[in-house]
Amino acid sequence: MSASTTATGAATPEAPSEHVPVSRLVAFLIMVFGMFMSILDIQIVSASLSEIQAGLSASSSEVSWVQTSYLIAEVIAIPLSGFLSRALGTRNLFAISAAGFTFASLMCGFTSTITEMIVWRAIQGFLGAGMIPTVFASAYTVFPRSKFNLVGPIIGLVATLAPTIGPTVGGYITDLMSWHWLFFINIVPGIGITIGVLALVDFDEPHYELLDHFDWWGLGFMAGFLGSLEYVLEEGPRNDWFNDESILIFAIVCVVSAVAFFWRVLTAREPIVDIRAFANRNFAFGCMFSFCVGIGLYGLTYIYPRYLAEVRGYSALMIGETMFVSGIAMFLTAPLVGRLMALIDMRILIAIGLLLFAGGTWQMTWITRDYDFYELLWPQIFRGVGMMMAMVPVNTISLGTLPAARVKNASGLFNLTRNLGGALGLALINTALDGRTDFHISRLHDKVTWGNAQAVDFLNMLTQRFQGLGDASMMALKQFNMIVHRQAVTMSFGDTFFILTFFYVGLSTLVFLLAKPANPMVAAEGGH
């Protein structure tokens, strides 16, 4: 599709009726809540992995797979949802996803071994993933263009708010009850969502004949490609990347499977994923922005708790309460963004959002070990407002101008890019933190020597403090080493925030690669 076609919106499907029945709106909101549950379940568990580890008597490497298995299964299922949504219909696919997710949540809560937990988390991730792109697709096919500035902020808010408040919700649940309730809490809403979707969703009809041409080879190649990629990105930073044999093997599997997958989708009669949507300029560049926004969305949801835990010594509940500011900022910004989308070029909104996000990370480049709630307040507000101003217009530009026949497949690809961006972001952030920590430790050790009078005086002061408690000089030396290490870690956080600042300022200059989309409100008025 040409850029001009995209820009004018001429290729947009015939708009649905301007009047949206209440039952359809209620059905959509039920689906949105299901998507919220699915996305929230990634981060809600991350805040309580230590409690799960203790409860299941697992090692630290084993408990990390509670997250990794969910993420690997999810990235495989998300692009698959486009084909299944056309074959089974939106109602059937969403109901199966919601019911399967609910049952898997129940089984996760009842598990008694780490192996069972990993298996059920993978099933939970695979089945629940279908809800995410299905909501995005429904938003841009069921509603008329004039309503995009209403439904766009709703799904954008859920996609960004759920991972942001995950640590908060997880901390409260674990603190008030137990880690089992991280999963049990999904059961009642999950049953309600399944029943509501079966009763109210009537957006489209299934085409079961497509299942006769299901591309099993394509599914296998896609699973090998995306599953291996997610594994390499998740495990690479903690296992020294390609120096680890398993990571090297999975990297080779990823490359080989990727080649086979792209050959298959270009030659199969009914490909498992239709990548022709990338011919649309706005969708292709929108996916690039979604990928980059995913780095910040998941990266900062990871880096703030890590700082608060390692440097400040906060509990999961205290971390959640501190990070809740971003969630409030997102919630309050969503309706404003919806209104601005009808008045301002959406590309300018994206650029402003990215610069606000960069402003928040820039303020954190001066981080010290004394940074607390009030020092983190404005950076988190900028993060929340910037994320909403960038994410919502990117969603609308990418999916809102595609032909209806392509939106279901495209929605899976679009959501996949955000998740892969998050996975790559976490891998790069972990690598940067580890590398810069080692660098700063080396630099600090060069300065903290017996020839440094200040260091010697401080060590003597620590030795006097530990007098009578044992080997005072050895205890003082260990305490001094811990202080130096903590300072190096804090400095590495500042360096990582600086890298993110530079990255998002640069990204903001690329918004004009997007073709100017038609104003949804103007387009709607012109159609009357």
Image: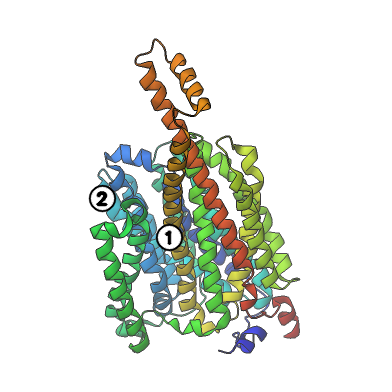
Front residue of 114/89: it is 114
Identify the secondary structure beneath mark 2.
helix
Local packing at callout 1 (Cα closer than 10 Å; few below 14, some 14-19, many 20+) is: many
**Viewer-side label of 1, 2:** 1
**Residue named by callout 1:** 423
N-terminal label among 1 and 2: 2
Q: Residue at x 59, y 85 (%)?
A: 13
Which disc, if any, is residue 116? 2
Q: Quadrant of the N terminus?
A: bottom right
137 vs 267, nearest the viewer = 267
Tell how many labels: 2
Residue 475, which numbered label? none
Res 52 → quadrant: top left
Q: In this view of the protein, can residue 79 be seen by the observer?
A: yes
Q: x, y percentage for residue 500? A: 55, 57
- Asked where in the image residue 393 lies, by quadrant, the reply is bottom right
